[in-house]
Image (cartoon, rainbow, N blue to C red):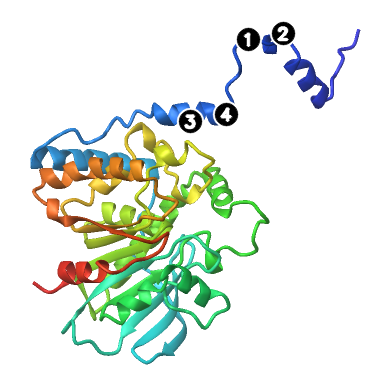
Amino acid sequence: MPKRVFPCRWAFLAFVSTPAFAAGQESLPTVNQHIKQLAADAPLALRFQGATADECRAWQEKFAAKLRELLGPHRPPAKWRVELQETAELADHRRETLLLHADGHPSLPMYLLIPKTSEVFKGKRPGIVALHGHGAHGYHPVAGRDDLPGVAKAIESASYDYGRQLVRRGYVVAVPCMTPFGPRLGPAAGKQDPCAIAFIRLQLLGKVLMAENLRDCLWAVEFLARRPDVDAERLGCVGLSYGGRMTMLTAALEPRIKAAVVSGALNVMQERIAGQYSCGAQVIPGLLKYGDIPEIAGLIAPRPCLWEVGAKDTLIAPKWAELALSRIRPAYAALGAEKNLRVDRFDGGHRWHGVEAYEFLKAALDAK
């Protein structure tokens, strides 16, 4: 007698109507409930538990090695060629639109902002990598491209032109465009999250989206460091939202970053994935086995790092922000650098504040 084949929907109905689902029986947890429990029970096995400088340095070496392993390849190319696409001579700075090309790597779009004059810095200037967050405009707002459709509104909504604000203060500023944003996105994928789509597709190729973006951030750091008008001993990194997340990661794994401003990103993945979270651009597979955002931030110590936290920022849960700080502080304390961990709390939302940031950067990157 031939086997009977049920259409999928009838097979599903037959399954859910079996006695195992009758009233009074234990319910089947949903996938979201399951993940929420896994997040609550995350091992975080490599949290810093020491108290001395030697213990902290040993922990930093061990955790950084594990983090690099989880990220996979993320080093920038050693050689590249620069395509100058456009130059704009503005009142107080020159803006160059560049494409960096290297064999075996996707080309990197970047703005370079160069001050025309400065009373702040003499000789070689400090360089800053300014990283953008989510949004359809990618790197355009950070560079101050309010001449482009929709960008002026984006700048106004979040004080989003901090790259332009920095070049006006005398810094040479590199503004790279990350994936999948701005000109690197291409046609939108309907209502689907392009970060999630890019993450999944790259995973099938053995790549991590966050590592791809880290490579490009490090590429921007190296680009600045090699410029004859930049002091490679005075490099900084700043960013809002996803730009803040990538600022933290870049500073954590690149010791040449002498100061970092992380804005709108004092949250943790353990809390994020307990809800409906889909941003593949921030996912490091396996991270919660070993640590979380506070542990990555602890790798920046003892170097100066300022965290901007808006009281009305709905993406930062106050309880989790305080928990994160409580796990970052011990690394700074162990290295005798408590004063280098700063928090700028302001009465605002998910936006760049800048009130403490500019004096913080000047103090950290001024010539000694």
The residue that mark 4 highlights is: 31
Q: Are marks 1 and 3 in contact (CB under 8 Å)?
A: no
Kindly identify which numbered label has been placed on residue 25.
1
Mark 1 or 2, closer to the camera: 1
The structure residue drawn at horizontal position 41% and vertical position 29%, both measured from the top left corner, is: 40
Horizontal side, residue 54 vs residue 316: left or right: left
Give yes or no for contact between labels 2 and 4 (Cβ–Cβ under 8 Å): no
Point out the tag, 2 or 4, that comes first from the N-terminus.
2
Labelled pair 2, 3 in contact (Cβ < 8 Å) = no
Of labels 2 and 4, the one closer to you: 2
In terms of image quadrants, where is residue 303? bottom left
Cα gap from disc 3 to disc 4, whole angstroms? 8 Å
* Residue at numbered disc 2: 19
**Sequence-first tag of 2 and 3:** 2
Q: Secondary structure at mark 1?
A: loop
Q: Which residue is mark 3?
A: 36
